[in-house]
Image (cartoon, rainbow, N blue to C red):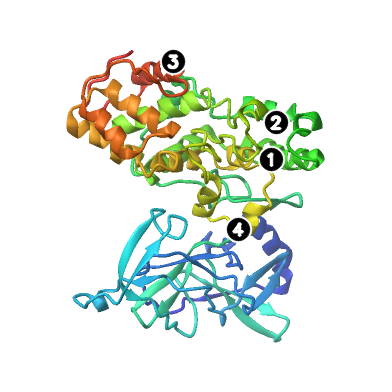
Amino acid sequence: MGRSMSSRHVVQTSEQEDLKAMLRNLELKDKTNNNVYGEFLTSNTILACQYGVKKQSLGSSSLKYTKIGDEEVLIDKDKNIRGTFGVCKSPKFAGLSSTTTIQVSASESIDGTAKTVGGHMCYMQLAQKWGALTKEIVVFDSSTQDYRAIPTTNSYILCHYGQGCIYPIDSGQRVTVNNTQYPLNDYKTTTNSNLIGTGASKNYITLAQLKSFGFEYNRQTYINRLTNYTTNDFQSVGANATAYLQEIQIQLDYLNNEFSNISDQDIVSNFNYYIEKYGIGKYDEAVLMFMAITAQESEYGTLMAELWDSNQNYVYNQRGGGYSQLTGITPSNPSGNYVDFLSHVGYSSNDISNILDQPFHVATYLPMSSAGYAWTKGNALSSDITIDVIEYGIRKGAEMKLVYLAVSYAINGGYVKSQLQTLLNGKTFSEPSSPPIGWKERKLSYNKAIQYFSHGTSTFVPF
């Protein structure tokens, strides 16, 4: 990674309006050779180190920025990083005794999993300047009357301590359309070209399967439901019902003006990306059951956020949201999953605090990634459903009906991993005396899923 700085592209004053438009598109391209430069880095940029175990951010108040259009972007001399990357796993320390052991939470971890890690404490010794993997962007800095290099997501900075490379994994930019700021989201849009999940190693599901399965991936029913809300729907959950409608209107603007431009194939590519990202694609059996569960939880993509129900003592941020109905606070999940999930995908604490209704927000912007996250958490029971339930059941030779029952318990919450594994040790399915919530509908979605999705090496028999 220790490459020299590449050739420069100087942004002249006359290009400011063009550059401003490019920033709106979150993608910088040279007009002559279509070479992608990457996104400018901001105070919200998330960084990783090739030898580190924790993500870190820029965001220091001492950082220096220069203005381009409406954006304040980092300049090359600034390399302040909010904290360290935890432990340095550089080969430089191979064979040496560990000097520290740290706990890394799921939201801090680069791969999204909580862990205990031993090694040598990270002590950053940063190089003097950022490097560029592609062409370097240079702008005129009015404060110094000089040209400055601007790091982008195609830049890196070297660390002399572990001889590793530190690089951005998220620019931290937020998408602005018609003066409205949209957050990070699952899908590619005309203004958000870099945040789509792409690059899955194979098609775990196809568009034809999704259509045959009857899954409403275009979210039209959800859009209709948001459109029909009035202030009366929110009188019981807070004094400022108007604020709810304003937040919903921003979501409707996004769905109608941005999401509506996404092709069917891009949506399926996104599904496949998150199926792979969260490890669901390891087994065809897991993909099949994941689609059956998301279908039941979301009524085949039409119920993206659970309805608020005072009879169940829910408050607005305790309802389920997304394709697998990621949960808020419940008796079996007293801390809820929303804050951990939003932190996991890159939201700052300030971003999260500004969201009035987290279920609506997740349902609008993050339906698929939240479903994958719920699958790895078993709704906060420390159960990765693919590994701890499905893989375990396959190894034990359990009937797929029994495995699916265990999956349904896991996604509902209320059972710990050891209980689920004890259930799977029985191998043979029988109807449970205390079935999981929605068990009748879950069986129907299972029966339908086995008609359209691959069975892997296992035998699936309908209920």
Residue at image location 56% in from the left, 34% down from the top:
320
Q: Position of residue 349 (x, y in %)?
A: 60, 58
Task: Please give the residue where the numbered disc 2 appears in the rendered image.
Answer: 226
Residue 343 location (% of width, % of height): 53, 54
Q: Are marks 1 and 4 in contact (CB under 8 Å)?
A: no
Q: Which amino acid, by three-letter code, is at mark 2? A: Leu
Please state the horizontal and vertical placement of residue 83, each as a whole percent of the image: 49, 73
Asked whether 339 or 286 is in front, the reply is 339
| Residue type, numbered disc 1 | Gln
Q: As drawn, which residue projects farthest toward the top?
A: 463
Horizontally, is 212 left or right of 321 in the view? left
- Of mark 4 and mark 2, the one earlier in the sequence is 2
Secondary structure beneath disc 3?
helix
What residue would you read off at disc 1? 251
Q: Nearer the viewer, residue 434 or 8?
A: 434
Q: Which residue is mark 3?
A: 440
Real-space Cα separation, disc 2 to disc 3, in angstroms: 28 Å
Residue at 64% over, 28% down: 307
* Contact between labelled residues 2 and 4, with CB atoms less than 8 Å apart: no
Residue 368 image position (x, y, % from top left) = 49, 38
Structural distance between the alpha carbons of marks 1 and 4: 20 Å
| Spatial CA span between label 4 and label 3 | 39 Å
Q: Are marks 1 and 3 in contact (CB under 8 Å)?
A: no
Q: Quadrant of the N terminus?
A: bottom left
The crowding category of the residue bearing disc 2, from other C-alpha atoms within 10 Å (few below 14, some 14 to 19, many at least 20), is some
Residue under label 4: 349
- Compared across the picture, whether 150 is left or right of 2 comes to right
Sequence order check, earlier mark of 1 and 4: 1
Relative to 112, residue 386 above or below: above
Q: Secondary structure at mark 2?
A: helix
SS at mark 4 in the image? helix
- Dot placed on the residue nearer the N-terminal end, 4 or 3: 4
